[in-house]
Amino acid sequence: MRLKTTLLLLLPAVGLIFLFMVIPMLISLLYSFMTANVYGGVTMPFTFGAYVQMLFDQDFSGNLTFMPDYLLIMLRSVYLALATTILSLALGFPIAWYIMCQTPARRTLLLTLVTLPFWINTLIRTYCWILLLRDSGLVNGFLQYLGLIDHPLPLLYNQPAILLGLVYTFLPFMVLPIYATLERLDPRLVEAAYDLYASRWRLFQRVIWPLTKPGIAAGTVLVFAPALGSFLQPDMLGGGKQLLIGSLIEMQFTSSRNWPFGSALAMLVTIAVVLALILQSRRRKVMEARA
Amino acid sequence: MKMSGMAKLRPFDWRHNPGFGTFTALMIMFLYAPLIVLVVYAFNANRLVTIWSGFSLKWFMQVVSDGNIKLAAETSLIVAACATVCATAIAIAAALAFERGWNFFGRGIAVGVVMIPLVVPEIVVAITTLIFFSMLGMTIGILNLVIAHTVFCIPFAMLPMQGRLRSMGAAYEDAARDLYGNEWRIFRRITLPLLAPGIISGAILAFVSSLDDFLISFMVSGAGNTTLPVYVYGMMRQGVTPEVNAISTILLLISTALAVLVFLFSRPSAVSRTAGAAASAVPSS
Amino acid sequence: MNLKAFAIATGLACGLTAGFAASPAQAQSAGVLHIYNWTDYTAPDLITKFTKETGIKVTLDTYDSNETLLAKLKAGGTGYDLVVVSNDFVPIFIDQKLIQPVNAADMPNFKNLDPKWQTRSWDPKAKYTVPWQWGTTSFTYDTSVYTGPVDSLGTLFNPPAAFRGKVSMFGSPSEVINLALVYMGKPICDTTPADLNALVKLLEDQKSSVKVYNSDGVSDRLVSGDTEIAQVWSGDAARARMQKSMLRYVYAKEGAIGWMDNMAVPVGAPDYANALKFINFMMDPKNAAIETNYAGYQNAVPGAARYVTPALASSPEFNPPKSLKMVFTHSCPALAIKDYDRVWTLLRQ
C-alpha cells in the first residue's frame, strides 16, 4: 500500500480523535495552568498554582503548609488499581487456561458466557452488587438464614467492596487477551517440555508464563488504566468515606469549583498511564527483538 | 508436583487440570450473580427490593407506558447504533492502514493517538468535550452525543480488526495482487470477507461501550437527549424502582439474542480472533 | 482512495441519519419546553396537565446537584428552557449571567404567592426566579433503635453507641458543613481558623460512626435498615416514614437548614415564552399542590393547602414548629469555599 493511501485511510480516525479528544485534553492542560474562577471555570492569570496545590496548600490561617492528602489519595488509587489488576490476573488466568483446554465449540460458548454480562450497563450491575452486599442484602440474608452469622456483615461501603466492584467490571478485559495468547500456544511446546520430564509447575513457570506475557501485558493495561480513573464503583460501593482520585477530580469540577486543580490531577493520571503504556511497549519490543 | 529421581512415564494430559473447571464455574457464577438478582427482582411485585411480595409483570408494563425511560433507552440505542456504524467504518480504514500500510515515520504516534480514548480519565474528557463543543458553537442536539461516542468507540472497534488482520496474514491479498487484481477488488472480494469476524467483533465492542457510557453522556447530552445510564443514575437519587430492573432485563434479552446470532453466523474461531485482538494490538507501537 | 471514500461516505450517511433523528425534536407545533430539573422532582401529572392545557410538548432531563448544573451551564450546555436552582446558588447564576430575567412580578398568577415569598433575599424583586418547592434539612432516626429523648443535632453529630456505624450523611460538603455549623451555633460561611479546626474535629470524630457519605438513596437505606440515623430533607423523610413508621424527623433546638428551590430560565433558552407560561402555570394553587403531593415538600402558594393530601398536610415533616430556627444558607465567598473544600478533603481522605 502506498504512503498516500495509508495516510488517507488514517485521516478520519486520527483526525476525529485529534479534534475531539486531543484538543479537549489540550484545553484541560491549558486550564491546569490558569486560576480558578470562584464560580467555576477559569480565569487569568496563568500560574503554577494548581500543581503546587498537589503538595502544598493554605491551611485555615493562611499559611502554606505541606499537605500530603492529595498524594495519599493518589497512592491509594494506584494501590487499588494495582490490586484490581493483580486480582484480575490471578482470577483471570485460570479461567483463560481452562477455556483454552476445551474443544473449540465449548470455547466459544464459554467465551460468550464470560463476556455477556458486559452488555448490561456497568451502573446497573454495580447497583445490583449493592443489593447483594448491603446489610439487608441477599448475601447477609442468606448467611443469616443459614444461621452462620447473627448480625449482618459489613460487606459494603468500604474498600474491599470497591475492589470487588472493580475486579467484577474489569475481569473480562483480563481474560480475553490472556486467552488470545494462550490460544496461539503451540501444544507441541508443552508436550516437548513434558517429554523432557518437566513437572506441572515447571511447565507453567518455564513455558507457559513467558509465552503468555504479551497477553498479560495487554490485559494489565486494559485493566489498570480505567481502574485508576474509575469513579462509579468508588462512588457507589465505597460509601464516600475515603476519596479516590476519580472522585477527587470529579469534586474539583463540581463542589470545589477548582477546575485548574481538577485538570492538573487529570494530567497526572494520564501521564501515569501513558508512562505505563510506554514502559510496557518497550518491554515488548525488547522481547520481540530477542525472539 | 516435583518428580523425583527416576523418570516416570506417566501419561498426563496437560489439558486436564482438576479444579480449574470448578473454579471457572464459580467465577462464572460470580459474574452472573448481579444479573440474576437483576432479573429476579424485575418480577417482584414490591417496590422495595428487600421484600418479595409475589410475581408480577407490572414493572414491565410500566416500562412500556413510561415515556421517559423509553425515550432514554431509544436515545441510547440510536446514539450507539450511529456511533458504531461511524466508528466501525473509520476503524476499518485505520486498521488497514496500520496493518497493511506503509510503515511511515510517526506511525507509532498515530497508534498512540488512536489509543488515547482508552487511557484518559473520563470526567476530564466529558467536561472538556462539552467546553470544546460550546467553543465551536456546536449545538446540534443528538449529533454532539454521536460524535463524542464515535470518538471513544474507534479504538474499541479497531482492536479486534487489527488482531484479525495480523493473524489472517496478507498471503491471500498478495496472491491476488500477483494475479493483477486491483486494490478495490482485492479489498471487496478478499480482505473484507476474511476480515468480517474482526469487523463484527469490533462493532459489538463499540456498540456495548457506547451503550455503557455514563460520564461523557452526562455532560455532553443536551435537552431531550438523555441516555439510559444517565437516566438510571438520576433514579438512584430517590432509590431505584424495579422499573430499572425491567428495562435492563429487556436489554439483556436483546443482547443475548444478538450474541446467539453472532455465535450462529460466525465461525467458531471468530470469537477467539476477537480475543486475539487485544493481546497483539494494544501493546504494540 | 476508494476505501477512504467509503469511510467518509458511511460517516456522512450516519451523520445525516443522526441529524434526521434529531430534527423531529425541533419540530414546532404549539412548541416545546425543555425542562431540566433534579431527579424525581417533577410530577408527571403536572407535565401531562400542562401539555393538555397548552399543547406544548415537554421533555424532562435531570441532574443530581446544583454543582453539576453550574458546571454544565458554565461549560456551555444548552437547549434547556427551565432549570431549578437552590436558593444559595441563585446569586451565583445571576452573577455569572447563566439565567435571564423572567420578571415574575408581572405574571398574572404572581399574586397567588405567599407574600413572604414574593420577596426573597436571593432575588428581591422576583426578577429571575419563582419558588418551586421548599423544605428543611435536618435528620431522621429510627425510634426502635434508640428510645432516649432526642431534640438536638448532637444526636447526629455525636451519635450514641446504638447508632455506631449506622449514620448516613450527605455527600456534598456544603450540606454537611452547613448543618454542622448550625449545630455549633456558628454563622454560615464562617472562616475563623479556630472555628474551622473545631469543625474538622467534630466531623472527624463523627466519621467513625458514619457508614455512608452519599446524598443518593438516603430514604432507601433508612427503610431497609442499612442506616438508622440520617441527614435528610423533609420530604424524603416523610416518604421514608410512610414506609417505616418508626422513623422520626427531628426539629432540633439548634435549628435546621431551610432551603428553597427556584425555577429559572437559562440564558439562551430556545423556548423562552413557553418557559414563562410554565412558571405562571406553577403559581396556580392546584398545580402547586400536584407538585407538593408528588415530591412531598412545601410550596409557596397558600391557596394550594386545600388540595394537598391530608396525610401529607398533617405530617410533622410538612409542618415545622413556629419556634424552629430555620437557617437559609447562601453561597460563600471564595475564601470560605476554599476552606470548606479543605475541610471536606481532610475529612474524606
Image (cartoon, grey):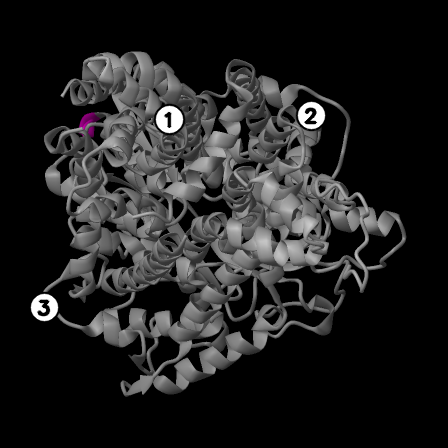
Reply yes or no: does residue C245 show up in magenta. no
Nearer to me, C27 or B183: B183
Q: Earlier in the sequence, mark 1 or mark 2?
A: 2
User: Mark 1 to mark 3: distance in Å?
Assistant: 41 Å
Measured as percent of width and height from the top left, residue C292 is found at 48, 37
Query: Which residue is tagged 2?
Result: B43
For the residue marked with disc 1, what is the amino acid? Ala
Query: Which residue is tagged 1?
Result: B80
For the residue marked with disc 2, what is the amino acid? Phe
Nearer to me, B195 or B50: B195
Q: Chain of mark 2?
A: B
Secondary structure type for disc 3: loop
Reply yes or no: does residue C271 show up in magenta. yes
Farthest residue to the front: give it.
B6
Visible residue check, residue A237: no
Q: Would you identify the image quadrant in which residue C16 lies? A: top left
Image quadrant occupied by the N terminus of chain B? bottom right
Question: Secondary structure of the magenta portion, mostly?
Answer: loop
Secondary structure type for disc 2: loop
Other residues around mark 2 within 10 Å, as few (<14) / some (14–19) / many (≥20): many
Residue shown at 68%/43% (left/top)? B27
User: Mark 2 to mark 3: distance in Å?
Assistant: 58 Å
Residue shown at 26%/31% (left/top)? B100
Q: Is residue A263 above or below residue B124?
A: below
Measured as percent of width and height from the top left, residue B45 is found at 71, 27
User: Mark 1 to mark 2: distance in Å?
Assistant: 28 Å
Q: Chain of mark 1?
A: B
Measured as percent of width and height from the top left, residue A173 is found at 50, 44
- Give the residues in magenta: C269-273
Q: Is residue A125 left or right of residue C113?
A: right
Query: Which residue is tagged 3?
Result: A45
- Give the mark count: 3
